[in-house]
Amino acid sequence: MPTAPRAGRISPEDVPSEELLAAVLASVDDDKAEEIVSIDLRGRSDVADYMVICSGRSSRQVGAIAEKLADRLKQAFGINVKMEGKETGDWVLIDSGDVIVHVFRPEVRDFYQLEKMWMPAGQAAARSAKG
């Protein structure tokens, strides 16, 4: 079996994380996700460069946002994302390499409060005051 990447195939490492982030933000915005938050993880985590957290109004919308994001990233960059939680639609995790995306139903997002865990203190307080 060949061990080298196939010619013309893009791996997640070949796509600049800022470009991937912009594509993710555009996709979730196009699908009417609510309260979209982008968190810069560079220097704070080896898992990813960015985390995006957003909400859908229903389980159906959460699943649709996640599925369309996966399709768009595959079309634009040839990236096959890893996805967890789409079956229930309460919280879908999409791992696209340098950008990790969490799509929640609002009640589930409020319960887990990932922003408080990952955002710098000043930014988390500002988001809480809005929402």
Image (tube, helix red, strand yellow):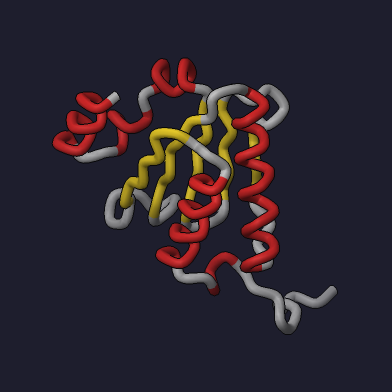
Which quarter of the picture shows residue 52? top left
Q: Position of residue 114 (x, y in %)?
A: 37, 30
Which quarter of the picture shows residue 77? bottom right
Q: Position of residue 72 (x, y in %)?
A: 65, 57
Q: Position of residue 58 (x, y in %)?
A: 59, 22
Task: Give the residue at x 80% y 77%.
Answer: 2
The relative height of residue 11 versus residue 8 in the rendered view (above or below) is above
The relative height of residue 53 versus residue 107 in the rendered view (above or below) is below
- Quarter of the image with the N terminus in it: bottom right
Residue lying farthest to the bottom in this orientation: 7
Foreground residue, 27 or 96? 27
Which quarter of the picture shows residue 110? top left
Foreground residue, 72 or 114? 72
Tell whether 40 sits left or right of 94: left
Task: Give the residue at x 43% y 38%.
Answer: 53
Task: Give the residue at x 49% y 54%.
Answer: 26
Q: Position of residue 129 (x, y in %)?
A: 20, 25
- Quarter of the image with the C terminus in it: top left
The relative height of residue 24 versus residue 65 in the rendered view (above or below) is below
